[in-house]
Image (cartoon, grey):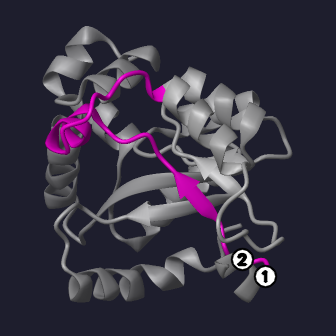
């Protein structure tokens, strides 16, 4: 209905979620890959009331090679998040040239470089507590020592942090690696007003990226 009301403006993103979310609702997490395949198959079935005949793209949250491959097979694209430009390049290779690739880029905007990097390190450390994120980082070639120490190279590669020029530069790396769009993700817990202020601060540096 949204696609019918606003042609060309609606994109549906679908994600498999996380084990702790399933546990919180009393469900078994199971295999995200098989569940996503089944969900996409059932989406094309008849609905009641019948869905309007309005096309819209479907993209899958995909942070691993198997989910990316499924996105390339059954969806219109993918939305990986939290990865470095090298992973964006891998995603583009898996998806091919004609699929939509939207990248979620975690950012820590701050005019103080040291404070920004520390905030970024905290984001990476929190991510490494999730098994899927730790596995994804290891697949990208970071050493066990870099992961254990949450090295500067790891932090600087994964997170956009610093002033507007630094944030824009990191977004530009993802675009150069094959992303069609880059969605800047403020730190979890950022209140709405602060997020708006950050967007206004960053906008002049970002508007000429393409």
Q: Is residue 11 above or below residue 199?
A: above
Quadrant in the rendering for residue 143? top left
Q: Is residue 138 above or below residue 18?
A: above
Range shown magenta: 7-32
Looking at the image, residue 73 lies above or below residue 205: above
Q: Residue furthest top?
A: 144
Front-most of residues 104 and 6: 6
Residue 152 visible from this viewpoint: yes
**Is label 1 in contact with label 2 (beta carbons under 8 Å)?**
yes
Residue 86 vs 204, above or below: the answer is above
Left or right of residue 73, residue 42 in this image: left
Judging by the rendered image, the residue that carries numbered circle 2 is 3
Image position, residue 76 (x, y; %): 75, 49
Q: Name the spot of residue 93 as percent of width and height, x first.
A: 74, 30
Q: For numbered disc 1, what is the local secondary structure?
A: loop
Report the front residue among 84 and 204. 84
List the residue tagged with mark 1.
Answer: 7
For the point 73% across and 69% down, the residue is 50
From the top left corner, tell me how far across and down residue 163 is, in percent: 34, 69
Secondary structure at badge 2 equals: helix
Q: Is residue 135 magenta?
A: no
């Amino acid at each position: 209905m949204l696609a019918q009301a606003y042609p060309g403006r609606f994109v549906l993103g679908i994600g498999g979620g996380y084990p702790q979310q399933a546990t919180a609702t009393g469900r078994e997490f199971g295999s995200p890959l098989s569940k996503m395949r089944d969900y996409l198959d059932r989406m094309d079935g008849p609905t009641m009331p019948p869905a309007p005949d309005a096309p819209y793209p479907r993209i899958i949250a995909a942070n691993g090679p198997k989910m990316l491959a499924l996105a390339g097979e059954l969806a219109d694209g993918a939305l990986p998040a939290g990865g470095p430009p090298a992973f964006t390049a891998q995603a583009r290779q898996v998806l091919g040239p004609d699929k939509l690739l939207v990248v979620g880029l975690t950012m820590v905007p701050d005019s103080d470089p040291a404070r920004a990097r520390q905030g970024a390190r905290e984001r990476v450390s929190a991510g490494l507590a999730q098994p899927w994120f730790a596995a994804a980082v290891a697949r990208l070639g970071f050493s066990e020592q870099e992961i254990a120490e949450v090295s500067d190279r790891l932090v600087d590669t994964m997170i956009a942090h610093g002033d507007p020029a630094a944030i824009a530069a990191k977004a530009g790396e993802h675009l150069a690696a094959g992303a069609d769009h880059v969605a800047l993700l403020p730190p979890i817990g950022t209140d709405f007003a602060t997020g708006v202020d950050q967007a206004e601060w960053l906008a002049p540096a970002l508007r000429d990226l393409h």
